[in-house]
Amino acid sequence: MNLKINSTTTLNNGVEMPWLGLGVYRSTEGEEALKAIDAAFQVGYRHIDTAKIYNNEKSVGEAVRNSNIPRSDIFVTTKLWNDDHGYDNTLRAFEESLKRLDIEYIDLYLVHFPVRDIRKETWKAMERIAEEGHCKAIGVSNYLSNHLEELLAACNIVPTVNQLELSPYCFRDRQSTVDLCRQHDIRLEAYSPLTRTVKFDDPALLSIAEKYAKTPAQILIRWALEEEVVVIPKSSNPIRIQQNADVFDFSISKEDMETLNSLNENFLVCWDPSREP
Ligand SMILES: NC(=O)c1ccc[n+]([C@@H]2O[C@H](COP(=O)([O-])OP(=O)(O)OC[C@H]3O[C@@H](n4cnc5c(N)ncnc54)[C@H](OP(=O)(O)O)[C@@H]3O)[C@@H](O)[C@H]2O)c1
């Protein structure tokens, strides 16, 4: 794909979402988060991924308001935490996130995890949130094909996005979920795309990085873009934030994508939603 740092994908409801975003999990509220987001905006990022559970929504909102960038040029995602599922709780949790962020509206509100039994009720409230106008798009996170099939059978609004852990080290294991999302025009979004650095020493990854004169991090981010997956690497370090965006001057050949995808080994650094019935 021929992309630039602020290139967007059109979601299934017409909303534009930047392909690259900054993840802020473990960016501490206050100076650390503010500095990271400011550095990202200076480099050209226009998309921030937070969640209630990250405890930094206030800083995300402050950074957006202080940025001097038009609100409509910035895309902010936040997420409904597991303790807040259920119809009334979801409506309340959304209002609280919106208040903490204090940015007029939320671009994308995601169900963070498919909590058993109660998630159907939750989605009804998500649909109401989408209809009421303070949220541009709703979606899910950590939904595998069984969770999605259940939702698709009952929903009035199809999720715009499914955010889940994706890297060459787990992509093939998630093929049925990937296929279902593509079939229903649900945009895939990769969290922990850098494997939290665990795979940076993998010789196969290093050899491809060397071939393209890029870092392992840049190869993993570009891999996601080649798979048409939105990608949200996290860093609190301005230099690494800049490096992680330096992925728009090359593309990975089909052959090397096949090599990367052959690294699949059911490797996850975060939680495993296949345990959730
Ligand atoms: N929906 C979900 O359930 C879920 C779960 C996990 C994550 N997420 C989202 O996805 C985002 C990204 O995932 P993640 O934070 O788990 O992991 P990640 O992006 O794979 O890795 C982040 C780690 O890599 C380091 N790093 C970043 N760029 C680097 C570079 N160029 N060179 C060396 N080290 C580098 C960071 O340290 P420094 O900060 O020191 O650079 C940090 O320790 C999160 O921040 C969050 O927004 C969502």
Image (spheres, grey):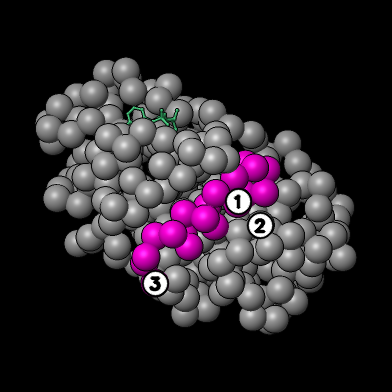
Q: Disc 1 designates what residue?
A: 57
Element carrying mark 1: helix
18 is higher (above) or lower (below) than 145: below
Can residue 206 be seen?
yes
Disc with the residue nearer the chain's start (3 vs 1): 1
Measured from the top left, where is residue 65 in percent x and y?
A: 48, 62
Mark 2 crowdedness (10 Å alpha carbons): few <14, some 14-19, many ≥20: some
Q: Residue at x 64, y 35 (%)?
A: 272
Q: In which quarter of the image is the N terminus?
A: bottom left
Q: Which span of residues is magenta-colored?
A: 51-70
Q: What residue type is labelled 3?
A: Pro
Tell me residue 130's x, y (percent). Answer: 66, 76
Q: Is mark 2 on a helix, strand or loop?
A: helix
Residue hosting label 3: 70
Pointer 3 with pointer 1, Cβ within 8 A? no
Location of mark 2 (residue): 100
Q: Give the Cα distance between marks 3 and 2.
A: 19 Å
Query: Is 28 contained in the magenta span?
Result: no
Task: From the image, give the main secondary structure of the stretch colored magenta.
Answer: helix
Kind of residue indicated by mark 1: Glu
Residue drawn at x 32%, y 18% as measured from the top left = 201
- Kind of residue at disc 2: Arg
Q: Distance between the residues labelled 1 and 2?
A: 6 Å
